[in-house]
Image (spheres, rainbow, N blue to C red):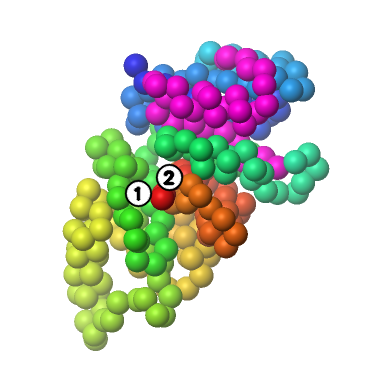
Amino acid sequence: MTKLIAAIDNSVAARPVCAMALAVAPVLGADIECVHVVEDGFQTAQAVAEASGLPLRLLKDDSLDALARVAVEPDVVAVLLGAHSHPGARRGVGHLPLALASGTDNPVIVVPPTAQPPARLNRVLVAMKGTPNRPVDLRRAIELATTSGLDITVVHVDDESTIPPFCDQVQHDTDVYATEFFARNLPAAIPARLELRIGSPVEEILDVARSVGAELLAVGWPRHAGPGHGEVAREILERSETPVLLVGTR
């Protein structure tokens, strides 16, 4: 049996992480194991895991090192953790989720502390900015969503320099473009809907997430993100009230 890791801290922010794990696990066909890196006690983490009916494994080590080892265990298919920053910060995802996403091939789901996960995952939004150089990087997430019978929307955001030309039959041309886009870039996503947007990628992606009621938002994350790279994903993580699935890209 495969395993979904829910990394929880010793605060009430562990609750939405456990709730999201319970929503995602049936889609993955995975069992759930909560893990907690003991730094400031474990009583709250233990209580949340027990209330959720989930087993808890306690780890003792640097947070990143401990979770990185767990994330690459052979039976692990994905890792969930909360969006946290340093104590006292108003908002931010912190370094841990991004470092973990950069160091593993498994998807990483980042759960905001204000998230209200559904009982079972139904609606997924897959975000693309511009023309994807390696659309295969997102196919894994889309194929999983498709085979699981989820409601999938793909949002493709262009700016004025990359938007495809349309004639006066806008709806017809948009439908044709959507069919060609999926066939060329994401053949596994043919059952999905395509939202074409022009403008700021972050604003448009978050707007579509709200409008379709997305319960999970999938974005690409460059594993070797240097300065100026991965900025769209970073900002989405900082602003999204919807859990974000980071899909590693090369």
Badge 1 amino acid:
Asp
In this view, 95 is above or below 226: above
- In which quadrant is the N terminus drawn? top left
Question: What residue would you read off at disc 2?
Answer: 247
Question: What residue would you read off at disc 1?
Answer: 137
In this view, 71 is above or below 235: above
Q: Residue at x 31, y 42 (%)?
A: 140
Residue 166: image location, x then y, percent:
26, 81
Helix, strand or loop under label 2: strand
- Direction bottom: furthest residue: 168
User: Spatial distance from mark 2 to mark 1, Cα to Cα?
Assistant: 7 Å
Q: Residue at x 40, y 71 (%)?
A: 158
Cβ atoms under marks 2 and 1 closer than 8 Å: yes
78, 198: nearer the viewer: 78
134, 24: nearer the viewer: 134
Q: Is residue 71 magenta?
A: yes
110, 213: nearer the viewer: 110
In this view, 144 is above or below 206: above
Residue 184: image location, x then y, percent:
21, 60
In this view, 129 is above or below 51: below
Helix, strand or loop under label 1: helix
**Image quarter for residue 64?**
top right
Badge 2 amino acid:
Val
Q: Is residue 45 visible?
A: no
